[in-house]
């Protein structure tokens, strides 16, 4: 295996996050000592402030910033909640502990002494305070030691260090490494891979893993098991940015598959504030594409598109990040043919067609969508 | 670590499965050569043939068997489909390959030469043929090399061998081993554990794994991430039956959590034919229990039960496997109090309350439900 010659990582250290929390606290204390109305600057996350940056290939937040004040009846409650979350995150980081959004809600929910008022009534309040803090500090929730539900597994000729353990992704039997919700602490030690295959479906992972595709073709093999979890998106970005590896994504040929792809690549409107750390602008869509259906004679295996598929296809056409010749052609072909195909349709050729013919051909020819 | 002194495993070898497929084929050929109407004996799976065996603590199939004939207009199509699946399974096993139900559907679906008839039109036909073959051969789908979607992760002082790799579950960083869909091939090599903790929720796994609970208390720690996948259920059974380890299950205190528990322990009515290999009759329900809510002062963290929760609770009361004093009391307490609690409610005490106080106390006192 080769030692990793990696590019600079954009991982934010715990020390740095603590520093940013402290700075926020000090600014507020400073305003209090000057008898000013304490405030926090919070970038606006509404759709009015979400835009697609075509140069950086990222869905991101614009420049609008709102000021949240302590002495403002409409702001006071969420001001308090944001500070409660900040204090809790500081505690978590200092104790080197991680927890979930739901646990944070239970930990912080209590009745304020001498009143009948709860600090937090419903989890959506603490969730919203967490995102406020993410954007105010320009960190991701993972830097605050707050975990999302993990999903996804990975194998390949890679050794990593995580929490004191050296883990060899090529020696994990049929299972693979369960990708945790937080991957900031992972250190790439040895990497012998030329690209990364990301399969939306576990069925594809099963096939390629059993056929030792990653070994024969020197790649990292990962499945997101549906829409990619945050930890998995972050890991894919780190492969691309730090290890400089091309990332090829495999989904079904339908609007749902394309959307899963676009979220991994460009980010999403709802989470525009995290595209910088969870997006992967240099990812490619490897297949299954609409033109593959003719090329590989899969017509008999296609499925009639439902109305909801066609509606969704028309919506995708209008998104800035699908506005390039190849994707417009792909989506229009779908709208014209009115059928879709699952990636498992390739199994109709034969079981190992995907690992022995389809993928090697596509990758060699560089036949993918941007 | 200790060498495993394990009890006899109920794993069915590939050779044995192949033999059973061959025997089925030979019996049919034999009938054909004697000019009889070829048939397959298939145990009935309808509710009329599902019963709860209180001695074995298993939901299982009764003795009713149906005969499926080739020369019977109502049977011929599914007779053919069952044999198609049997032939495909034989091929999979011989090639040491595994695949999914969806892939099998694509692989077997084709138009019969000289007709306009498809072998299989919709996946429910091939799925049903697979189950027919499972019960006819008395094997599980996994023995036929057919995989379900995997879910779940595991850590602990355990070394296993899988597909030629030696895997140490105590050296997997924050991730853990991703449990594959098929675990028949796994060999337990070294096991230094006194019991198994199964957490329904990943949040609990995160907490206990980060606190190295499995190391301090010598146990195996596993999360099902919701309703347990087949591979995960099978692995839990193997811990219990082959390694003779007590299994303690942690879910929320609500009918949904109890049902997840009961499926792992007794099996389910829909999958009664696999309880023998996926059930875990000696599992215990460790918590959170309704009485824990008072004992640990969690009343402020409870959630009002919805109508659907109460209806579900009343249904559970009537199931044979919940008809014992302790569970009737537990469920009646829920119906009377009309509130439920999530396991994360324990975090309201403090972050590590579950790993430092709750679990050690409960396990030491043997305070669990049957």
Image: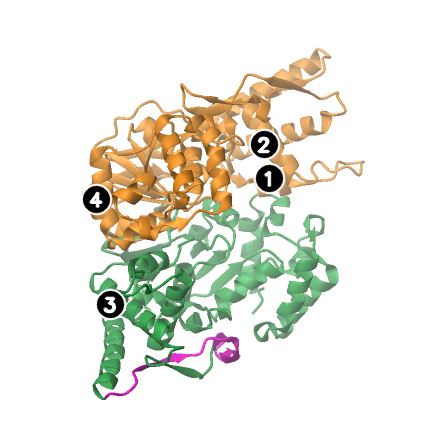
Chain colours: A green, B orange
Q: Are marks 1 and 4 in contact (CB under 8 Å)?
A: no
Numbered circle sitting on residue B130: 2
Q: Secondary structure at mark 2?
A: helix
Q: Chain of mark 3?
A: A
How far apart are the alpha carbons under marks 3 and 1? 51 Å
Q: Do tag 2 and tag 1 residues touch (Cβ < 8 Å)? A: yes
Query: Callout 3: few (<14), some (14-19), or many (20+) C-alpha neighbours within 10 Å?
Result: many
Are marks 1 and 4 in one subunit?
Answer: yes
Q: Which residue is mark 1?
A: B104
- CA–CA distance in space, label 4 to label 2: 41 Å
N-term-proximal mark, 2 vs 1 = 1
Residue at 43%, 57% in the rendered image: A219
Question: Pointer 4: residues within 10 angstroms few (<14), some, or many (20+)?
Answer: some
Q: Nearer the viewer, mark 3 or mark 4?
A: 3
The image quarter in which residue B194 lies: top left
Which of the two discs, 3 and 1, sits closer to the camera?
3
Q: CA distance from mark 2 to mark 1?
A: 10 Å
Q: Secondary structure at mark 1?
A: helix
Taking the spot 75% from the left edge, 36% from the top edge, the residue there is B112
Q: Which mark is residue A90?
A: 3
Residue B259, percent from left and from top: 44, 37
Whole-number angstrom distance, CA of label 1 to CA of label 4: 42 Å
The verdict on residue A52 being magenta is yes
Whether residue A307 sits left or right of residue B201 in the image: it is right
Please say if B46 is above or below A64. above
Q: Are the numbered discs 2 and 3 placed on the same chain, yes or no?
A: no
Q: Are marks 3 and 1 on the same chain?
A: no
């Amino acid at each position: 295996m080769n030692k990793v010659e990696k590019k600079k990582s954009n991982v934010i250290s715990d020390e740095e996050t603590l520093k940013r929390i402290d700075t926020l606290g000090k600014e507020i204390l400073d305003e209090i000592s000057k008898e000013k109305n304490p405030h926090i600057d919070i970038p606006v996350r509404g759709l009015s402030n979400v835009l697609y940056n075509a140069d950086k290939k990222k869905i991101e937040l614009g420049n609008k910033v709102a000021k949240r004040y302590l002495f403002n009846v409409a702001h006071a409650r969420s001001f308090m909640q944001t500070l409660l979350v900040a204090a809790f995150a500081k505690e978590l980081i200092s104790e080197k502990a991680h927890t979930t959004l739901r646990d944070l809600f239970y930990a912080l929910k209590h009745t304020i002494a001498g009143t009948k008022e709860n600090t937090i009534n419903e989890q959506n309040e603490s969730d919203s305070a967490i995102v406020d803090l993410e954007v105010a500090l320009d960190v991701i929730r993972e830097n605050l030691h707050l975990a999302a539900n993990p999903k996804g597994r990975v194998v390949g000729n890679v050794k990593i260090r995580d929490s004191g353990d050296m883990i060899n992704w090529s020696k994990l039997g049929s299972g693979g490494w369960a990708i945790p919700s937080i991957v900031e602490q992972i250190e790439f030690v040895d990497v012998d891979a030329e690209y990364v295959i990301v399969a939306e479906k576990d069925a594809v992972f099963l096939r390629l893993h059993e056929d030792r595709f990653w070994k024969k073709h020197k790649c990292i093999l990962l499945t997101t098991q549906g829409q990619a979890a945050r930890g998995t998106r972050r890991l894919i970005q780190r492969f691309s940015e730090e290890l400089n590896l091309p990332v090829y994504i495999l989904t079904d040929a339908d609007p749902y598959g394309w959307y899963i792809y676009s979220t991994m690549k460009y980010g999403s409107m709802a989470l525009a504030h995290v595209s910088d750390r969870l997006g992967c602008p240099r990812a490619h869509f490897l297949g299954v594409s609409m033109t593959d259906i003719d090329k590989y004679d899969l017509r008999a295996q296609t499925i009639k598109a439902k109305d909801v598929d066609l509606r969704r296809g028309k919506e995708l056409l209008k998104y800035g990040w699908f506005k390039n010749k190849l994707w417009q052609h792909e989506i229009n072909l779908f709208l014209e043919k009115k059928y879709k195909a699952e990636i498992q349709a390739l199994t109709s050729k034969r079981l190992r067609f995907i690992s022995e013919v389809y993928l090697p051909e596509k990758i060699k020819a560089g036949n993918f969508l941007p």
